[in-house]
Image: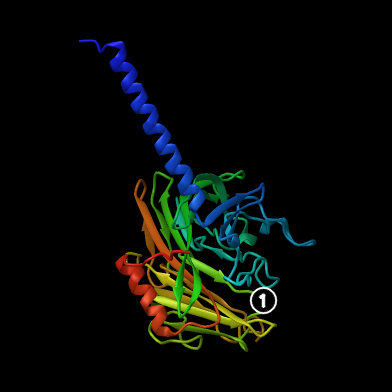
C-alpha cells in the first residue's frame, strides 16, 4: 500500500533531521581536529596544532643550478620537522643527488629479462613519481592523507611504463614521552606489480622499506644510532632490528631524533638495516639509515598480488631512553597505543 502524504512528509523530516545531525557531527569533528592538511601546487603539508610535521612533494623537485635534471623527482617527504621545528631530513646532497629525505625506491630489480634501477636516478632506468591524491582525513585524533605513486620503467619504452603501483598513507598524531610531546608519524606503503609477469627485487644493501637521509648538520661527531638489539653505528649495518633510534645535535646546542619502528608483519621482520659507517662521504660521517627488507634475501612480486610495509616514526626533541623506544614499539606491535588528548 502506498504511504499517505503525511507519512511521506514525516519520513522526509526524519531523514532531513538525521542528515543535519550527521553534517553537524562531521563539522564538529573537523573543528575539533588538532591537525590540518595544506596543499599547494608543489606539496602537501600535514600540520599538528598549527605546527608543520611532514611535507610531501607531489611536484617534480627542481635540482640545483648546474645539476643534471635527470635527478628531479617527486613522491618523497621533506622536511620532517621535530616538535620544536628542527628540520631532520635532507634532499639532493652533492654526494648523492638522488637522496630525497624519506623515500623508498627499489634498487636492483629484474623484470621481463631487464634490470631496472628505480633508486639511482643517474642511470636513467627508472624513477618514482606522484600520481594522485587519494584521500585526506582530519579528526579528533590527528590527520592523515593517502597518495598514489608510480614506479616507472624507462627501459621498456622511452616515455616510461608503470611497473609498480603504490599507495602511501601518511598519518600524524601526538603522544607523550618522558614528560613532553612527541610527533607520531605513521608510514604505510601498499604496492603491487602492475605487469603481467613477476618482478624480482634482488637482494641488495639498498632498496624499498623506508630510507632516511639526515640533516647536513649531523656528522660522525654529533649523531648517534641505537637499535633494539643494542647495536650502534659501528655495528648496526646489515643487522636486524625492531626499532632504530637516530639522534643528533644542532649548531644551537639542542638535540632531536627519530625512533623508526618496524611493524612485526613486515617482510623479514626484525628487518635488516643499512646504516652508513662513520667514515661515510670522505670521513665526514653523514648519516643515512634504512630498514631494507631485501638486504639479505631477494623478493619476487607476483602479478596481481598486493604487498604491504608499515613503519612508525616517533619524532622528538632532546633524547629518549631505550626503554621508552621499546615501549613505543610494543604499543605499535600490539596495537595498544593511546593517542594524546592534545
Q: In terms of depth relative to the viewer, which is nearer, 125 or 180?
A: 180
Please identify the quadrant where the N terminus is shown: top left
Q: Is residue 138 above or below residue 223?
A: above
Asked whether, in this view, residue 66 is left or right of residue 243, the answer is right
Asked whether, in this view, residue 251 is left or right of residue 157, the answer is right
Q: State whether residue 147 appears in this view.
A: no
Give residue 25's quadrant in the image: top left
Give residue 294's quadrant in the image: bottom left
Disc 1 crowd rating (10 Å Cα; few below 14, some 14-19, many 20+) is: some
Q: State whether residue 316 appears in this view.
A: yes
Secondary structure state at the residue bearing disc 1: loop
Query: Circle 1 sits on which residue?
Result: 216
In the image, what residue occupies the spot 40% across and 38% down?
A: 22
In the image, what residue occupies the spot 63% across and 72% down?
A: 86
User: In the image, residue 172 lies at what x, y percent?
Assistant: 49, 60
Q: In terms of depth relative to the viewer, which is nearer, 40 or 70?
A: 40
User: In the image, residue 58 lies at what x, y percent?
Assistant: 61, 51
Q: In terms of depth relative to the viewer, which is nearer, 301 or 223?
A: 223
Amino acid at each position: 500500500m502506498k504511504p499517505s502524504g503525511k507519512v511521506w512528509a514525516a519520513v522526509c523530516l526524519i531523514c532531513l533531521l538525521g542528515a543535519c545531525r550527521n553534517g553537524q557531527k562531521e563539522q564538529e569533528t573537523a573543528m575539533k581536529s588538532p591537525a590540518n592538511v595544506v596543499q599547494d601546487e608543489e606539496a602537501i603539508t600535514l600540520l599538528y596544532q598549527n605546527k608543520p610535521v611532514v611535507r610531501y612533494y607531489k611536484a617534480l623537485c627542481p635540482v640545483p643550478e648546474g645539476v643534471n635534471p635527470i635527478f628531479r623527482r617527486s613522491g618523497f617527504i621533506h622536511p620532517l620537522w621535530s616538535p620544536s621545528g628542527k628540520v631532520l631530513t635532507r634532499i639532493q646532497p652533492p654526494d648523492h643527488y638522488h637522496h630525497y629525505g624519506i623515500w623508498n625506491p627499489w634498487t636492483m630489480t629484474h623484470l621481463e629479462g631487464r634490470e631496472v634501477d628505480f633508486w639511482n636516478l643517474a642511470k636513467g632506468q627508472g624513477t618514482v613519481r606522484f600520481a594522485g591524491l587519494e584521500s585526506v582525513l582530519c579528526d579528533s585524533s590527528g590527520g592523515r592523507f593517502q597518495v598514489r605513486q608510480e614506479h616507472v620503467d624507462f627501459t621498456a619504452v622511452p616515455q616510461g611504463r608503470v611497473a609498480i603501483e603504490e599507495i602511501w598513507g601518511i598519518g600524524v598524531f601526538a603522544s607523550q614521552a618522558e614528560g613532553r610531546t612527541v610527533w607520531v608519524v605513521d608510514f604505510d606503503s601498499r604496492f603491487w606489480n602492475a605487469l603481467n609477469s613477476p618482478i624480482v627485487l634482488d637482494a641488495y644493501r639498498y632498496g624499498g622499506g623506508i630510507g632516511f637521509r639526515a640533516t647536513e648538520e649531523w656528522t660522525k661527531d654529533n649523531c648517534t644510532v641505537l637499535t633494539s638489539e643494542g647495536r650502534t653505528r659501528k655495528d648496526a649495518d646489515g643487522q636486524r632490528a625492531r626499532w632504530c633510534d637516530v639522534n643528533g645535535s644542532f649548531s644551537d646546542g639542542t638535540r632531536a631524533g627519530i625512533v623508526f619502528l618496524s611493524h612485526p608483519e613486515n617482510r623479514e621482520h626484525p628487518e635488516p638495516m643499512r646504516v652508513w659507517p662513520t667514515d661515510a662521504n670522505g670521513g665526514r660521517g653523514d648519516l643515512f639509515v634504512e630498514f631494507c627488507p631485501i638486504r639479505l634475501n631477494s623478493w619476487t612480486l607476483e602479478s596481481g598480488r598486493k604487498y604491504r610495509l608499515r613503519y612508525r616514526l616517533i619524532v622528538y626533541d632532546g633524547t629518549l631512553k631505550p626503554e621508552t623506544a621499546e615501549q613505543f614499539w610494543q604499543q605499535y606491535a600490539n596495537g595498544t597505543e593511546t593517542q594524546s588528548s592534545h
